[in-house]
Image: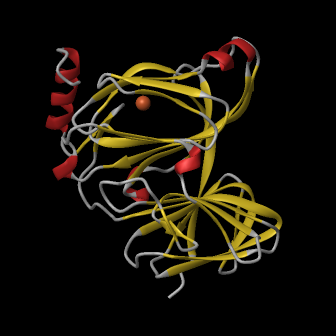
Amino acid sequence: MNRTLHSIVPTHTVLEGGGFKVRRPAAMGRLMSPFLLLDEMGPVDYAPGEAVGAPDHPHRGFETVTYLLAGGMKHADSAGNSGDLNPGDVQWMTAGRGVIHSELPQDHMMENGGRMHGFQIWVNLPAKDKMMAPRYQDIPSGDIPEATNDDGTVWAKVIAGEALGVQAVIDTVIPITYIHLKMQPGATYTHTCEHDHNVMIYAFGGSMDIEGRSLHDGGLGLLSEGDAVTLVAEEDGAELLILGGPELGEPIARYGPFVMNTRQEIYQAVEDYNNGTLA
Ligand code: FE2
């Protein structure tokens, strides 16, 4: 059974961290399980000295996944991991029991300015994995599988899950689908999904038809249940993310950068952070 587009969540633009512009769906959390947040960072054109990022801050209980399309970011964390993110690279950071990290523009972005564009999504962890040891997967663009359909009208970058017969290389704690798709005008793509996973489409360029309903740039489309979804790009083509994963069905207690199941666990996270034992 093909999935349909059962609702479209609009996005709004907010300033996050040190003041960088993000486009974010207006309704998050339970509707999007297991995803907690979807931020499109930019696109923004920085003048020299203007670029901003997020200095040291903690996380516990979930994963932060950064995918850069343009610009350059650098990352360093309390577990001793550090790395540069360049266009096409993905950093899949499992905070687990706790990480303190910084996410900043690379020096050349600070000095010369330039365009910054990318995504950060937060993937929730099931209760049994919230306190797992932190894990860091820093995957350069060249190691992330890409695929094109037979007539060359659909291109996919397979960050997690599978598309066009190609399997991702990133290891996820729970089964996650994260595909970047570019479709030429009129192109058709059918994505096979786990029947009971929550699957959503975020359009960030052009528009597409999903079983008779249009999804446009800046819309997050939540899909009904089913085994597949068919996307047909409209006249401007379409660029989008496909995100999918299981419904966790667990309570969410959330306070800033901590996402746990109970308020008591949140108090514990704040206490651990304040007394220096979070990470
Ligand atoms: Fe962060």
Q: Is residue 60 above or below residue 26?
A: above
Identify the residue shown where x is 65% and y is 58%: 240
The picture quadrant where one finds residue 47 is top right
The quadrant where ligand 1 appears is: top left
Q: Is residue 40 visible?
A: no
Residue placed most toward the observer, 118 or 226: 118
Spot occupied by residue 94 in the image (x, y as percentages of width and height): 33, 41
Q: Is residue 37 visible?
A: yes
Q: Is residue 132 above or below residue 202?
A: above
Identify the residue shown where x is 67% and y is 31%: 71
Spot occupied by residue 32 in the image (x, y as percentages of width and height): 43, 57
Picture mark count: 0
Question: From the viewer's perspective, is 81 left or right of 104?
Answer: left
Spot occupied by residue 154 in the image (x, y as percentages of width and height): 71, 68
Q: How is the image coloured?
A: secondary structure
Question: From the viewer's perspective, is 276 left or right of 121?
Answer: left
Identify the residue shown where x is 35% and y is 31%: 257
Spot occupied by residue 229 in the image (x, y as percentages of width and height): 57, 77
Identify the residue shown where x is 54% and y is 19%: 18
The picture quadrant where one finds residue 238 is bottom right
Q: Is residue 182 above or below residue 115?
A: below
Q: Quadrant of the C terminus?
A: top left
